[in-house]
Image (cartoon, helix red, strand yellow):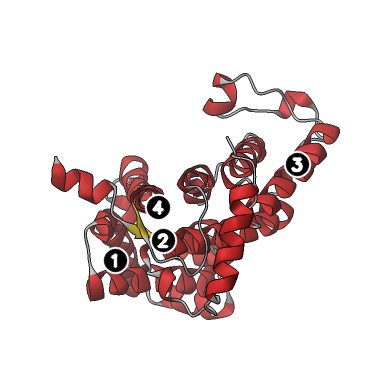
Amino acid sequence: MRALGRWWYPPVPRARIAWLRILAYGFLPFDMLLLTNSTLAHAHLPPSLYQPVLLARLVHLPAPTPGAMYALLAVTLAAAALAAAGRLPRAAGLVAALGYLWWVTISMSYGKVDHDHLALVVALFVLPTAGRARIGDREGCEASGWAARCVQIAVVAAYFLSAWAKMRIGGPGWPNGATLQWALNRRGTPPGRLLTDYPGLLRAGQWVTLVAEFASPLLLVARGRWLLLGVAFFAGFHVVTYALMTIHFLPHAIWLAAFLPLERLPWPRRAPGDREREETRDGLVAAEG
């Protein structure tokens, strides 16, 4: 049990959480305005086309309306900006997480469900739990470790469950068939279409994909060079996928950063006087919920 506890709550520097928050709240406007902006379009559709996913059905989430969705967009982005600035990181972060969950649930409730947003949703919910975190603060914190671990698990779950779905739905035909050839014919880039003349190579790629996704839980126990190699492999996988088929999985791929020692990134150190003044100022700020 102690070993499990150390795995769940490793003392991770708060600086890593600070960097992950920058990633989360900085990516949110890009995602909401460009990747999941279908939510706004869905709000103009007849309510009869609304096909709520399980979560929406459980909480009785109504069909979207234009006014509600524009208000949701404004509130979510405002809360994200507040949390990114380090103000009320728990309260503002929770508002941003709930708002985005509502937003992306609507986006996925019209017939198409993407699995590349799982890690982003989890990150938005767990990162605020670590409380205040500053870049440059390398003090180990179990709360930070738990938050980072949850994001890592979400990343691995997306890979592993994707492989499980491939085998559950496609069976042996997925790695042995013409899956990639069909995808490249449908939406391949010019370099990608060149590979359609090499079916054996494409089948090998399908097997590599399947094995790698099933092996992704190893990222949760790997250390040092092996962990970096694993992260580099999956990052390269997404780069190649985009280069060949313009499928980016960006809301998921960015969270490979949760496996990296981001606290080592260069950042100007503050003078001792600046730190003391900041701590005094923080002491005057009302405690957040």
Q: Which mark is residue 75?
A: 3
Q: Residue at the location (27% across, 47% down)?
A: 8
Q: Which mark is residue 144?
A: 4
Near mark 2 (Cα within 10 A), the count class, few <14, some 14-19 or many ≥20, is: many
**Residue that numbered label 1 is attached to:** 208
Whole-Å distance between the Cαs marked 4 and 1? 33 Å
Q: Position of residue 254 (x, y in %)?
A: 50, 63
Query: Looking at the rendering, in which quadrant would you find the C terminus?
Result: top right
Under tag 3, what secondary structure? helix
- Residue 9 against residue 14 in the figure, above or below: above
Whole-Å distance between the Cαs marked 3 and 2? 26 Å
Three-letter code, disc 4: Ser
Q: Nearer the viewer, mark 4 or mark 2?
A: 4
**Residue that numbered label 2 is attached to:** 258
Compare residues 277 and 125 and report the one nearer the observer.
Answer: 277
Three-letter code, disc 2: Ala
